[in-house]
Image: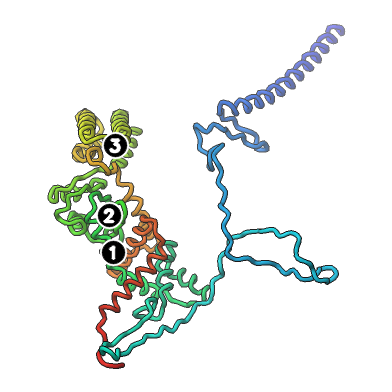
Amino acid sequence: MICSNCEIWEEYQRLKAENEQLRREKAELEIENGKLKRRLALYESVKVPLPRTRRRVVSRDTSEKRFPGKPKRSPGRTRPKPEPNVVIAPEWESCEKCGALLPPPEVVDHHIVEEISNPSPGEVIDYLELGGKCTACGTYNVAVHPDCPPVGRFGKNVYVQTTLHKFEERLPLARIGSVFERSGLKISAPTELELLWRMSNWLRPKYEEILSSVRSSRVVYTDQTGIKVDGTDFWIWDFVTELETLFVIRKRKSQKVLEEILGKDWDGTLVGDGLRSHHSYARKSGAKIQRCWAHLLREAKELGEKYEEARALSEGLHRIFDRLKKALEDDPPPEERAKLARTAMRAMGRLINKRYKSSRVRKFVEKMRRGYPFWFTFVTVPGVEPTNNRAERALRELVVHRKIIGTLRNEKGMQIYETLPTLLATWKQQGLSLQEELSNALTEAWQNMREKREKPRGVA
């Protein structure tokens, strides 16, 4: 009996030790399994949770994820080294140890840096205005410096910098005053608004010149966005050509705005997002319409992600657009362009004539049907883009300003936000210096005002 108990006890101890050994081996295998999974994740992008004490391994498969920065092996760019226009040398006179006079330096190194000047105190200028009668013919002559403003106590640079701070740096009027104060010029927000109002009046003839150029253009891109004027809904319209950008603010979103800006008989090509006013204007004036493909494809893609029956519709529209875009890269002749347009219209017609169950898809197809003749103008008319992205990009600047100011108060603000952004956007589009163009435009406007001013009679 005792021997039997001893055998059972020994068997129990053996099994216990074996169990402990198996547990240790299991724990080691689990650790090893975790390491292998994490190593496998580096190659197959398998998401494996890691302990918090360990650094998370990020997959380097750039086909699925996009990482910031330039792609690998892209050529680097170094800032070009400028030519110095000022040379500053340290003192080189006596030895810092014994005080003896030093001979000419043995080594001269160059450390070229780019620097800006600190805000300097503002100047107070006394412009002399001279007048007198000619002794030979009796004509009374007046001499005024071209930089002398016709009214007010602020110089030309103040007007220029106020405009740039407002519409390029997007600073509120109070912030503009802080910028000027660092240069020693104290100016209040109402005064800055008055300066902008004067600028819009003086430069309005330049605005009218841009309006005339837009009217004479054969292709115009347009877009609209809302804005409040003293609590009332208004619309900001933009009209973009190859070299000009025109902004207008009107209470209407109708064809009357197009008739006012482009003219009732304008017969060019209008590229837009498909407003009814565009089509009404085209029927009366004889203009051509190009509906925006970016809006069409984006909406089709969203529907294709939600409705199974719209997936083939989206793919078909993308396929039509991609084929047209590729075919037009070589600028084919008019006969081939017309053939491409007919083929594309038949392909879109097949998509439109299919039966769709969803009401949203049917509504989208009805939108395609209403604009059916106007999707392919860019194929038959060279130089026309298939989207109105130009107008949308130009309008974003005033959208940002709308978020900053919230609303306009009156017609004075409307004229400021029409005139000055139009000039700045056009000059920027043409690659011109905004500061130089503003300065030259002011000088020209002031000179024209002096020439129109009635000359005094008699001797002063």
> Is any atom of residue 460 visible in this view?
yes
Residue type marked 3: Asp
* Sequence-earlier tag: 3 or 2: 2
Q: Is residue 263 left or right of residue 385?
A: left
Residue 418, how many percent across, how many down?
30, 63
In 3D space, how far apart are the residues under numbered discs 3 and 2 (Cα atoms)? Answer: 26 Å
The quadrant in which the C terminus is found is bottom left
Label 2, secondary structure: give it. Answer: strand
Front residue of 54 and 408? 408
Residue that badge 2 annotates: 239
Considering only vertical position in the picture, is 432 above or below 459? above
Q: Amino acid at mark 2?
A: Phe
Residue at image location 57% in from the left, 59% down from the top: 83
Query: Which residue is disc 3 drawn over?
Result: 331
For the residues marked 2 and 1, what is the alpha-carbon distance in whole angstroms?
A: 13 Å
Lateral position of residue 156 relative to residue 39, left or right: left
Question: Of circles 1 and 3, which is in front?
Answer: 3
Residue shown at 41%/83% (left/top)?
127
